[in-house]
Image: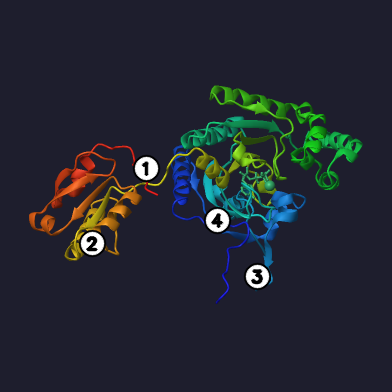
């Protein structure tokens, strides 16, 4: 017997039954981002490795440890994208979008790849929905972007999520904070985990992000970045908070929030869910301002702010909610005898063309087995087609949730089904 081949570790298949939740999240995002004027951008799954090294940063976990990097047949170093902000910025620069409009608002959704240690909510292929606003440095733009996320989560019915905000300052004021932080962390080096002792050398801000409790305790008592902000950065952060107030968006100021990428300046934010199902993977999304990145990638001096949400984690939360997302069939057509099989197939085809969601057992078989299948399908109605129905042109719609059958002419099934009031879905038979 041939050996079975499994999927790649950390990369999941999404099958019908689960995919409906994903489709719900994706279509909600499309509607909502569209309302805010964000247009969809699709970039390739693979980019020049240098793009991520120069934007995300060599010292980050993402670039340093997690990237799927390979050489193509032409000897180029390419990487599966680990995130969406740098590819979008690359496309923005490459197409000189700044010459076409002063402000651009883009969103993207799709798979990202990181070689991570897997657990609940943490995979090697995962999906993100993200948005980027280019060309506006004002705090109103940061607030608008957070409003997109707030309304998106509301539309998904996920309300138990807290917005954390912070400011990391800019090139002017961050060095002083950085120096103070290094001094402080060095004095507490022995209390830090092995990873953080290394981070301290290479990327001290990352220590604040560590999930280890001891490191968190050290970080909590460390210098507060907000006390180091220069006047323009302080004003930006204060105004952002005022704007969030104007929009009625609740938030928490968290001076330890740094985020895992190097490119942020000033505003950073995260949306953190409190549901225990996510364990340590409780951050459903986050983002920040990256005013210097475009220039660092050889592009124009255009300020930008963006965020990315992890779809896998949103889907986990929605699964916990117990809601159903699959659309049930309007009608199941069962045939009473062999001779009605063709007519049944034809009727199903016609009703689908007329817009109904119709289930039909292509295997035929006994009426009893078809009725079992009808039960399982969760269809609103079943119509049994036999010789009598075919000759009279009259049939009955049997409501699967119980109740009186509804007489129907075979040439007006779609209209009759649509005219019936919605009853709650029957519990599917086991
Ligand atoms: P974490 O601290 O959880 O590792 P991160 O800071 O690496 O997150 P970002 O790069 O900011 O995450 O990505 C934004 C969102 O994408 C995260 O908040 C999370 O919801 C999701 N995400 C990131 N990495 C993964 C992963 N390996 N599997 C599933 N979702 C992920
Ligand atoms: Mg990470």
Badge 1: residue crowd in 10 Å (few <14, some 14–19, many ≥20): few
Q: Mark 3 to mark 2: distance in Å?
A: 50 Å
How far apart are labels 1 and 4 at the CA level? 43 Å
Residue, disc 1: 427
Which element carries disc 1, helix, strand or loop?
loop
Label 4 to label 2: alpha-carbon separation: 42 Å
Nearer to us of marks 3 and 1 is 1
Is residue 48 in sight in this rendering?
yes
The mark nearer the N terminus, 1 or 4, is: 4
Q: Secondary structure at mark 3?
A: loop
Position of residue 379 relative to residue 274, above or below, is below
Disc 3 versus disc 1: distance between alpha carbons?
Answer: 52 Å
Q: Which tag is nearer the camera, tag 3 or tag 2?
A: 2
Residue in view at x 66 percent, y 24 percent: 238
Q: CA distance from mark 2 to mark 1?
A: 27 Å
Q: Nearer the viewer, residue 58 or 353?
A: 353
Cβ atoms at labels 3 and 4 below 8 Å apart:
no
Q: Which residue is mark 2?
A: 345
């Amino acid at each position: 017997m041939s050996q079975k081949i499994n999927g790649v570790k950390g990369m999941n298949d999404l099958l019908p039954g689960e995919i409906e939740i994903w489709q719900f999240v994706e279509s909600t995002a499309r509607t909502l981002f569209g309302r805010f004027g964000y247009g969809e951008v699709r970039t390739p799954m693979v980019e020049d490795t240098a793009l991520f090294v120069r934007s995300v940063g060599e010292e980050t976990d993402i670039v340093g440890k997690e990237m799927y990097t390979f050489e193509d047949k032409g000897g180029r170093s390419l990487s599966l994208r680990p995130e969406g902000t740098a590819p979008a910025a690359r496309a923005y620069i490459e197409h000189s979008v700044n010459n076409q409009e002063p402000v651009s608002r883009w969103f993207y959704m799709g798979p990202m790849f990181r070689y991570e240690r897997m657990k609940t909510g943490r995979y090697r292929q995962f999906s993100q929905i993200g948005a980027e606003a280019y060309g506006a440095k004002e705090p109103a733009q940061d607030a608008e972007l957070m409003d997109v996320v707030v309304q998106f989560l509301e539309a998904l019915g996920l309300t138990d999520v807290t917005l954390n905000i912070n400011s990391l300052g800019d090139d002017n004021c961050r060095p002083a904070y950085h120096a103070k932080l290094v001094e402080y962390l060095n004095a507490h080096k022995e209390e830090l985990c092995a990873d953080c002792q290394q981070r301290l050398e290479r990327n001290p801000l990352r220590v604040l992000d560590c999930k280890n409790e001891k490191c968190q305790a050290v970080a909590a008592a460390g210098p507060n970045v907000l006390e180091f902000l220069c006047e323009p950065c302080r004003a930006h952060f204060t105004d952002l908070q005022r704007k969030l107030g104007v929009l009625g968006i609740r938030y928490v100021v968290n001076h330890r929030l740094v985020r895992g990428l190097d490119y942020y300046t000033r505003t950073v934010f995260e949306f953190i869910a409190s549901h225990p199902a996510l364990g340590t993977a409780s951050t459903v999304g986050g983002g920040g301002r990256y005013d210097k990145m475009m220039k660092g990638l050889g592009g124009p001096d255009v300020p930008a702010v963006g965020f990315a949400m992890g779809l896998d984690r949103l889907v986990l939360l929605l699964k916990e909610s117990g809601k159903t997302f699959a659309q049930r069939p309007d009608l199941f057509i069962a045939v009473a005898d062999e001779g009605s099989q063709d007519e049944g197939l034809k009727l199903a085809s016609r009703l689908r063309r007329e817009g109904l969601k119709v289930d039909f057992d292509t295997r035929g078989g006994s009426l009893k087995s078809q009725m079992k299948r009808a039960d399982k399908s969760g269809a609103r109605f079943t119509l049994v087609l036999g010789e009598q129905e075919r000759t009279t042109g009259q049939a009955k719609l049997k409501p699967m949730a119980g109740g009186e059958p509804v007489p129907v002419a075979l040439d007006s099934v779609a209209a009759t089904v649509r005219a019936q009031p919605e009853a709650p879905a029957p519990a599917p038979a086991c």
